[in-house]
Amino acid sequence: MKKSIHGHLSFGVLLIVMIFNTVSAAPKGPLATVPIVTPGVDPAKLPAYYPSAFSRAGKIQDLSLRSKVFVINGTNYNYSSNAKVHTLKSRFGTLQMLRKGMNIGFLVTKDGNGKVTVTEIWELPAGDAPGLDL
């Protein structure tokens, strides 16, 4: 009988440790980010003010400054009118600097209702679209 209880206790402790490790490793704050993997772009050559990862990335297919929406890889993204913009030449830019065909990496947040909003945008070098849209 003791072996059976001990076996159950060991399994219970192992289960608690596994759950704790899973929860503590979960991303907090903005949606999970993915590493920068941009074909033909060396992350070491990006400006120092660029992050090591973005939430999403892709090529701007369409955008509307009036509606605060852009399309990346066929997906519409709403962006905040206060979204920060960073370019390859300037640490701070404006939303008006965004253009169709521009490759970007961006940070998204998700509110309690599940609405995803772009809050920060980084211009990526021209060339193949990064294809990191999740």
Image (cartoon, grey):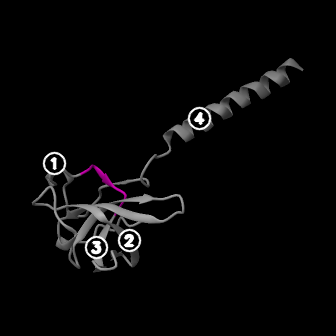
Callout 1: helix, strand or loop? Answer: loop
Dot 1 corresponds to which residue? Answer: 48
Under circle 2, the secondary element is strand
The correct choice, above or below, for 132 with respect to 26 in the image is below
Q: Determine which of the numbered discs, if any, sits on residue 78 in the image.
A: 2
Rate crowding at label 3 as few (under 14), some (14 to 19) or many (20 or more) other CA atoms within 10 Å.
Answer: many
Q: Is residue 113 left or right of residue 32?
A: right
Which is more foreground, mark 2 or mark 1?
2
Q: Nearer the viewer, residue 131 or 83?
A: 83
Q: Amino acid at mark 3?
A: Lys
| Whole-number angstrom distance, CA of label 3 to CA of label 2 | 15 Å
Q: CA distance from mark 1 to mark 3?
A: 22 Å
Upstream in sequence: badge 1 or badge 4:
4
Residue 40 at what x, y percent from top left? 20, 63
Q: Distance from label 4 to label 2 (Cα)?
A: 34 Å
Label 2 – label 1 distance at C-alpha? 27 Å
Marks 2 and 1, the one that precedes in the sequence: 1
Q: Is residue 106 above or below residue 61?
A: above
Going by the image, does 113 lie left or right of 58?
right
- Give the mark, 3 or 2, whose residue is nearer the N terminus: 3
Picture coordinates of residue 5, whole percent (x, y): 83, 23
Residue furthest left as drawn:
89
